[in-house]
Amino acid sequence: MKKRRFLSVLGLIGLTAALLISGCSSQSSTQQGDKVELYMGYSSDPPTKKKMEEIIAKFEQSHPHIKIKTMTAPYDDFYQKLTTQIAAGNAPDLWQSDGTKVFGYAQRGAILDITDYVTKEISKEELNGLEFNKDSDGKYWGVPQGIQVGALFYNKDLFDKAGVPYPTADWTWDDLKAASVKLTLDANGKNADDPAFDKKSVKQYGFAFFGSSRGAFNILKAYGGGVLDPTLTKSIINSPENKKAVEWMVDGMQRKLFPNPADLKAFQSNFKAFLSGAVAMQIDIYAATTSMNGAGLNYDVAPMPKGPDGKRFAPVIANSWVINKKAEEEKVKAAKEWITYWTTSDEAQKEWTAVGEAIPVKKSVANSEMFLNPATKPENKKVFLDTLEFAGTIDTNAVFTEWVKVFTDNLAELFMDKYGTDEFITKTDQGIQKVLDDFFKKQ
Amino acid sequence: MLELSTKQQEKPAVKKRKWLDSEGRWGLLMVSPYLIHFLVFVVGTSVASLYFSFSDYDILNPPKWTGLDNYEKLFEDPLFYRSLWNTVYFTILYVPAKTFLALLLAVALNQKLKGLKFFRMVHFLPVISSWTVIAYVADAVFNQRIGFANAFLTKLGIAPQNWLIDEFWVIPVLVLIAIWKSVGYMMIIFLAGLQGISSDMYEAASIDGANAWQKFWRVTVPMISGTTFLVVILNTIYSFQNFEQIFVMTGGSTEAGSTGGANNASLVLMLFMFRQAFSFFKMGYASAIAWVLFLILLAITLIQFKLQKKWVHYD
């Protein structure tokens, strides 16, 4: 009797455990009737989550055979969760990937090669940014979901106060520096041109840049230099063009026209320097308009300045829809239907444009009042679309975060006067090459 | 793992008493939630991470065995030594200062004072605050542009400092803030220790003509040496595992000069490990760091246990 009771308790525990375990991986039950359940992931904040849910509801109405189940979280959490899900084999069939992360997942074998689908069914003429997800072998790994492109943001109030004309499309980086001199003020309101200018008490800076897409990378490119070669496996840091660009930056830091990493740290976050009106110009991407509008800043945008030889560069990040390499066939099919819907449907594009988070991928919508809406800042939104003509990717590859870390760490030391330009070039060249070899030589 | 547990189960079976009589079975059943948890989440994960540390593992693909590769790379990595030194330096400043301060506070708040509960509570308040809140409070003091610290220095005619980005200052300032945040917790442990000392001891000392200082050194300090030992061990472990503070206060992203401060001056082992695992897809390498960190901590703790014989008294 006792034994039987013991066994039944044991059985109960086993049953509970089994239920728990199967509950954790229950999304393998795929079809309910003829409906395909598509598991989709995207990173979100409250407004983007709400909008995405609305778009999904509309999609399900017009595609009754597909039911979408979602996984979403704020940016950092989303990618941590996604990575563990991929490891456990229960990742979404389709997810929205930050443009800088596409190759990281693709070259580690987690994303499906969709070259066939893209070349056959996606129209290059109608879509912005398709080429930015093509790797050096010509393979496509994703289809743009929203485009981010960089421009020169400037604070109109600070320009007006200093009596400096606004940046124009003809500006070179030297023009930017000349304007910065007039826009950099110390505690007594004297600008950097004044002999009495006090470098130790700068209250307003001319121009701020930091990180990769908002930083030195763009200036190196405009000067004819760069970080990685076209195969994205070799460092090209050690070049006379780069040296010239780096010297240009260091000079600005030393004259206090540009805040160095320590100066920026004083604003708690690098972004707050410009947002709080203590910096007159900054490189940023379209997504920044949301927080700038929130801060009530009086600002506009101009194209990125030209280098000494007239070369121009702006960063572009194509956030993209990518498909899980392990997704089942019918889900891949459903995922493609979603991507086609997202990129071709005016309804979806207009809804997403309204969030104001990215430049629409569909050209007809991007060129319409929906996006170019003159009632919201920045007035000159067309700059973003024109910039797409000369914009390029920021050398995103499988080890992007790792080489960027070496690059930005070394830049910080250079800007803090820990070493000179030559040492920076040698050290960074070796450091980045080591990161690249570590990954690509192993393959 | 299964093998292990059956082995454990077989051992007592050699003994005369049937180990799985009804009482034994019920006992096993009752402890099974703990046992399962222990085997899956403690033993299982440790064994897995040990395996990963000997393999090339990017999380997305199955691990590939590479032998001692990760460890060889680790011992050649200048950033490993940099982060190890930062961690050790943090510990050297942190453990003695915090232990001493906690004891001092506990002694002060062990008196019969008016508003005693209030004072104890005030010191405990930072303990229960989140690091994000503490970071904002600390910023009010150490922000180089608007903080009190620099305002004060400027008044004295001394040049302002870049507290949290300067290579020289960053660790001492982080230690100071860490002590302020958590000293209250150790104070409570000391208070419990102090209240365990019988008042007879102090009376006896008074009769022998001991003054307050002598009573502190000859009675209080030896009598709570057991507590002090516990506090030292806890502080050491805490300081080696410090992550949240440094992540929050010197940034977690890849922005220039944020993670680990300028020249990686505040890059500690935990941050170094986190970055390898979750930013760079190098879980194998990160696991090797974790095991080295574990061995270092184990060694330090064993040394402390050995040394305790010389200074810790139990009644």
Image (cartoon, rainbow, N blue to C red):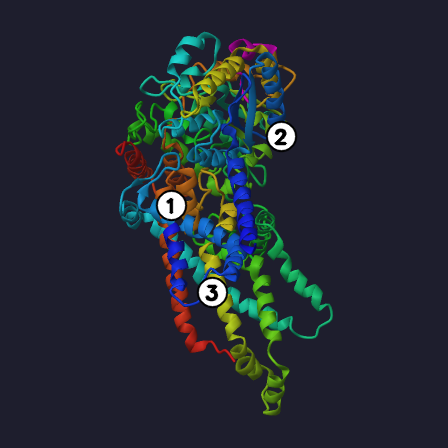
Label 2 amino acid?
Answer: Pro
Residue at (45% x, 19% y) in the render: A332
Q: Quadrant of residue A315?
A: top left
The x, y position of residue A375, in whole percent, is 65, 16
Local secondary structure at mark 1: helix
Looking at numbered disc 1 in the image, what kind of residue is underneath it? Ala
**Residue A331 belongs to magenta span:** no
Location of mark 2 (residue): A46
State the mark number for residue B233. Answer: 3
Marks 3 and 2 in Cβ contact (< 8 Å): no
Residues marked 2 and 1, same chain: no
| Rendered location of residue B216, percent (x, y) | 56, 80
Check the image and report above or below for A393 versus A204. Answer: above
Q: CA distance from mark 1 to mark 3?
A: 25 Å
Identify the mark nearer the N-term, 1 or 3. Answer: 3
Q: Is residue A274 left or right of residue A108?
A: right
Q: Amino acid at mark 3?
A: Ile
Residue A114 x, y percent position in the rendering: 40, 17
Question: Start and end of the magenta stretch?
Answer: A358-369
**Mark 3 neighbour class, 10 Å CA radius: few under 14, some 14 to 19, many 20 or more:** some
- Residue extending farthest to the bottom is B208
Q: Nearer the viewer, residue A14 or B95?
A: A14
Please name the residue shown 58% across and 32% down the image.
A275
Disc 2 packing (10 Å; few <14; some 14–19; many ≥20): few
Q: What numbered label is drawn on residue A367?
A: none
Residue hosting label 1: B286
The answer to whether residue A196 of the structure is visible from this angle is no
